[in-house]
Image (cartoon, coloured by chain):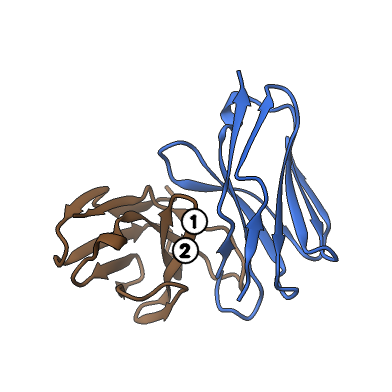
Chain colours: A blue, B brown
């Protein structure tokens, strides 16, 4: 089955800097790649997604890039702010699996360097 | 108000006892999910429910069963809980727009099995 690997288990940057979280997947049939954010002690909520018919999607300070050849996608956060500190999970799914059967990465704990 | 509600939020049980975790959503979503989250492992899918009485095993269904008798309710049952089922359990729901779409997560139920 699909495997999603999140390369950075932790990531720290200075406030205002940019950050990148990278994920790779194994199944070439995967076509939907969402990102979820989990703040400390809280639940997960959706932040942004990308489908395989595009290679870039931006929403305010967040940009997702998709490289289908390399089976890699990444979340870029610009002008980082304290409220960005959280665990970020990438995920992948493919059509035909029935509903939204996501495979999640293990998460990247993102924080700002004081 | 788009909400997924889980009960109880915290639960302590002894090994061998039965556990019932309940989940409700007010969005009339067809599809509901149960995940567990363990440190360093990310989220693992236990069961998916496509609608009332239409349930499918996820990646780690062993030791669990589910029940969905109403669209808005999805229960996770552990018959004879084991210590390795200590975890945080998340319920989620989504519309079934094809095979992709945002998941809405509940706040989580922290289960400790002694």
Residue drawn at (31%, 65%), measured in percent from left and top?
B73
**Percent of width and height locating residue B82:** 24, 65
How far apart, in angstroms, are the residues tagged by discs 1 and 2? 8 Å
Quick one: quadrant of the C terminus of chain B?
A: bottom left
* Protein chain holding label 1: B
From the image, state whether disc 1 or disc 2 is nearer to you: 1
Q: Quadrant of residue A110?
A: top right
- The image quarter containing residue A105 is bottom right
Q: Residue at x 65, y 45 (%)?
A: A8
User: What numbered label is drawn on residue B41?
Assistant: 1
The residue at 75%/73% (across/down) is A28
Considering every residue shown, the one lying at the far top of the view is: A114
Q: Crowding near pointer 1: few (<14 within 10 Å), some, many (20+)?
A: few
Q: With B73 as the anchor, is A3 left or right in this view?
A: right
**Residue B44 marker:** 2
Q: Is residue A98 above or below residue B88?
A: below
User: What is the x, y in percent for residue A33?
Assistant: 68, 60
Looking at the image, residue B39 sits to the left or right of residue A51; the answer is left
Label 1 with label 2: CB-CB less than 8 Å: yes
Q: Is residue A50 left or right of residue B83?
A: right
Q: Which chain is mark 2 on?
A: B
Q: Quadrant of residue B34?
A: bottom left
Tell me if residue A77 comes above or below residue A69 in the rendering.
above
Viewer-side residue, A96 vs B109: B109
Element type at mark 1: loop
């Amino acid at each position: 089955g699909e495997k999603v690997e999140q390369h950075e288990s932790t990531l720290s940057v200075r406030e205002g800097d940019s950050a990148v979280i990278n994920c790779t997947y194994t199944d070439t049939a995967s076509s939907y790649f969402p990102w979820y954010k989990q703040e400390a002690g809280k639940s997960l909520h959706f932040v942004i997604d990308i489908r395989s018919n595009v290679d870039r999607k931006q929403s305010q300070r967040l940009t997702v890039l998709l490289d289908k050849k390399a089976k890699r996608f990444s979340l870029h956060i610009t002008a980082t702010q304290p409220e960005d500190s959280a665990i970020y999970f990438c995920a992948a799914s493919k059509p035909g699996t029935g509903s939204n059967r996501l495979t999640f990465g293990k998460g990247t704990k993102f924080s700002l360097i004081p | 108000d788009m909400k997924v509600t889980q009960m109880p939020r915290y639960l302590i049980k002894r090994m061998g006892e039965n556990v019932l975790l309940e989940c409700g959503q007010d969005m009339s979503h067809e599809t509901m999910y149960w995940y567990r989250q363990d440190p360093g492992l990310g989220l693992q899918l236990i069961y998916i429910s496509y609608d009332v009485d239409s349930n499918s095993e996820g990646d780690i269904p062993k030791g669990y069963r589910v029940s969905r008798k109403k669209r808005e309710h999805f229960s996770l049952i552990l018959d004879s809980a084991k210590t390795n089922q200590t975890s945080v359990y998340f319920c989620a729901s989504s519309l079934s727009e094809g095979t992709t779409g945002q998941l809405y997560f509940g706040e989580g139920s922290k289960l400790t099995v002694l």
